[in-house]
Image (cartoon, helix red, strand yellow):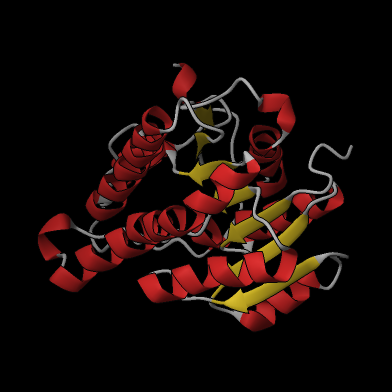
Amino acid sequence: MNQLSEKVALVTGASSGLGAAVARLFADRGASVFGIARDTDRMAAVFDGIATGTYVSVDLTKPDECRQAVAQCVAEYGRLDVLVNVAGSHTMRHTESMTDDDWAHDLAVNLHGPFYLCHAALRHLLASGGNIVNVASIAGIEGQAYSAGYCAAKHGLIGLTRALAVEYSAQRLRVNAVCPGGMLTPQVTDFAAPENADYNLILRIAAPRGMMAPGDVAKAIAFLASDDAAAIHGAVYEVDNGKGAG
């Protein structure tokens, strides 16, 4: 299955979890993968089995580093066909106890970083007739307790996806979003509830069929990034193991 053959993909959050699964799957399906995250040691392990791939450490909260990452990708491979914004951060907090820094961090990682990368990548993607896949969350289409900053950012990422889809609807660019439910990634396995949390509220996010493997969500992303999805533009895909069916 080489639906991504000869494509160049920039994947964020490529050091672990869903980002690592996307990087590996894209490479397996023929893409050259440029991975970015903060932890180069973990990316080295991910990219050890990737034949055509490069990775660099990037702080997505810094606009200049995002722009430089896109420039490095294009310098390395000569083009950019796919941008996959996977990286995210979710810390549950009581809203009344959130600090200004907590709020700023939630938006910086989950919304500002994807915008900076989209902004820097647009001219290259327009030139290649490429596409963007933004990884939002079911928190981008519903409310979740103790997640004000995360929900606000992920709702914003869906808004960004739709705004770009409308703006570039007549040009050679597709923009879509995926909204995963719970996956067996460090964000879940390292989960910590805030003190005195109401677990009945937290359990509302659970899917009836349980947790998903990151690789299963990566397959949905790979489909949207491929030419098989040529007619899909401005879509918000729920990949949630049945969470939204009820």
Please say if 137 is above or below 118: above
Percent x, y for residue 205? 41, 37
Q: Quadrant of residue 197?
A: bottom left
Percent x, y for residue 210? 59, 36
23 relative to 104 in the view: left or right = right
- Does residue 85 appear anywhere in the picture? no
Percent x, y for residue 207? 51, 32
Name the residue rendered at 59%, 57% in the picture: 185
* Camera-nearest residue between 29 and 142: 29
Quarter of the rendering occupied by the C terminus: top left
Percent x, y for residue 47? 78, 70
* Camera-nearest residue between 225 and 42: 225
Q: Quadrant of residue 10?
A: bottom right
Please say if 117 is above or below 204: below
Name the residue rendered at 68%, 64% in the picture: 34
Quarter of the rendering occupied by the N terminus: top right
- Does residue 147 appear anywhere in the picture? yes
Please say if 30 is above or below 63: above
Q: Residue furthest top?
A: 246
* Camera-nearest residue between 188 and 43: 43
82 relative to 132 in the view: left or right = right
Name the residue rendered at 55%, 60% in the picture: 189
23 relative to 130 in the view: left or right = right
Q: Residue furthest front?
A: 127
Name the residue rendered at 53%, 77% in the picture: 38
